Image (tube, grey):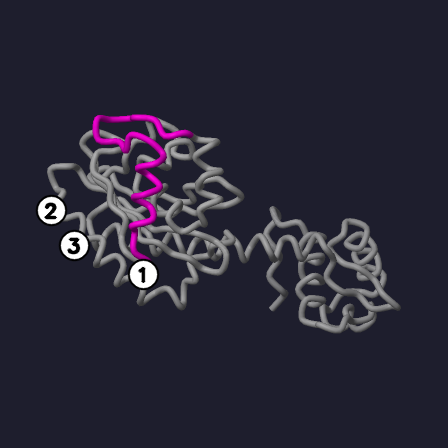
């Protein structure tokens, strides 16, 4: 029986180049062109041509007649690993969203800024609308208060110098002095809660996560009329995070 022809839409040179990259990747200490040609089943002239091209583009590097993965390929690998870590976090947030029936947020404090990395919600349980920039209003929402409680006093004061306390609702903390006193009273690993300080009609809770030198948090929100659910849901979330933290590591560097 004759071999099955490859679909006309496939580009043979790309297939061969990818096969070469995969083969080089299996050789931690490099491999010569002749060995790569033998292992991939490619003709030696074709192998040389593809190797030269891949070296020129940075996907391979040549050293003393041996070929190794180059910086471009390593960047692809690093990006793939980051995507995989992010997918793990997204899946975890979606699981907690469905289990608790609340929107779930993941945020970090990085280089002096509050960054909302991921939000998981549904049409039936929508996230709080960002009507005022989350980065500039950390004093008013549970995410920001939780992150600010994890950094040192000097960093807190620097943050508040750049983003001064301002009243967003009648319930927002009134000045930086009162906010700093509140942050000092937050006990380690305790959920941080706020009630209608950022947005009227919304209450929020944030679980602190300090992994390495990075302050992070997983948070939830609820309509104000469901405030009675806030702390029980936050406690359950904290328990869930504790069980999954080892395997997740929550991809702080994503």
Q: Residues within 10 Å of mark 1 (few under 14, many from 20)?
A: some
Residue 235 locus on image (x, y percent): 21, 57
How far, Cα to Cα, is label 2 from label 3? 8 Å
Q: Which quadrant holds residue 46? A: bottom right
Residues marked 2 and 3 touching at CB (< 8 Å)? yes
- Say which of 251 and 195 sits in front: 195
- Say which of 71 and 100 sits in front: 100
Which numbered disc flags the more N-terminal residue, 1 or 3? 3
Circle 1 sits in a helix, a strand or a loop, which is it?
helix
Residue visible at 31% across and 65% down in the picture: 242
Residue 241's disc is: 1
Circle 3 sits in a helix, a strand or a loop, which is it?
helix
Circle 2 sits in a helix, a strand or a loop, which is it?
helix
Q: Is 244 left or right of 74, judged from the image as shown? A: left
Q: Which quadrant holds residue 43? A: bottom right
Residue mark closest to the camera, 2 vs 1 = 2
Residue visible at 21% across and 31% down in the picture: 171
Quadrant where the image shows the N terminus: bottom right
Instruction: Please determine whether, in this image, residue 223 is positioned above or below residue 246.
Output: above
Is residue 173 found inside the magenta-colored segment of the image? Answer: yes
Residue 212 locus on image (x, y percent): 49, 60
Q: Which quadrant holds residue 172? A: top left
Q: Is 27 left or right of 237, judged from the image as shown? A: right
Furthest-right residue in this view: 64
Which numbered disc flags the more N-terminal residue, 2 or 1? 2
Is residue 152 found inside the magenta-colored segment of the image? Answer: no
Q: Which residue is mark 3?
A: 232
Q: Which residue is mark 2?
A: 228
Residue 139's disc is: none
How far, Cα to Cα, is label 1 from label 3? 14 Å
């Amino acid at each position: 029986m004759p071999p099955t022809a490859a679909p006309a839409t496939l580009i043979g040179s790309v297939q061969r180049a990818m096969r070469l990259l995969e083969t080089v990747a299996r050789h931690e200490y490099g491999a010569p062109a002749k060995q790569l040609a033998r292992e991939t089943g490619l003709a030696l002239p074709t192998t040389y041509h593809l190797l030269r091209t891949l070296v020129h583009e940075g996907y391979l590097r040549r050293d003393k007649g041996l070929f190794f993965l180059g910086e471009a390929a390593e960047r692809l690998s690093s990006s793939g690993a980051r995507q995989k870590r992010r997918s793990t976090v997204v899946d975890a947030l979606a699981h907690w969203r469905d289990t608790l029936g609340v929107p779930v947020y993941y945020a970090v404090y990085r280089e002096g800024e509050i960054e909302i990395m991921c939000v998981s919600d549904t049409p039936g349980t929508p996230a709080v609308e960002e009507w005022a920039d989350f980065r500039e209003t950390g004093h008013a929402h549970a995410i920001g208060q939780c992150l600010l409680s994890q950094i040192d006093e000097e960093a807190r004061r620097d943050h508040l110098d750049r983003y001064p306390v301002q009243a967003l609702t009648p319930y927002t903390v009134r000045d930086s002095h009162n906010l700093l006193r509140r942050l000092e009273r937050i006990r380690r690993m305790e959920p941080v809660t706020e009630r209608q300080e950022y947005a009227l009609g919304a209450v929020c809770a944030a679980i602190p996560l300090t992994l390495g030198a990075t302050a992070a948090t997983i948070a939830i929100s609820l309509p104000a009329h469901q405030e009675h659910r806030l702390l029980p849901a936050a406690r359950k979330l904290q328990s869930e995070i504790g069980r999954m933290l080892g395997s997740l590591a929550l991809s702080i560097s994503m």
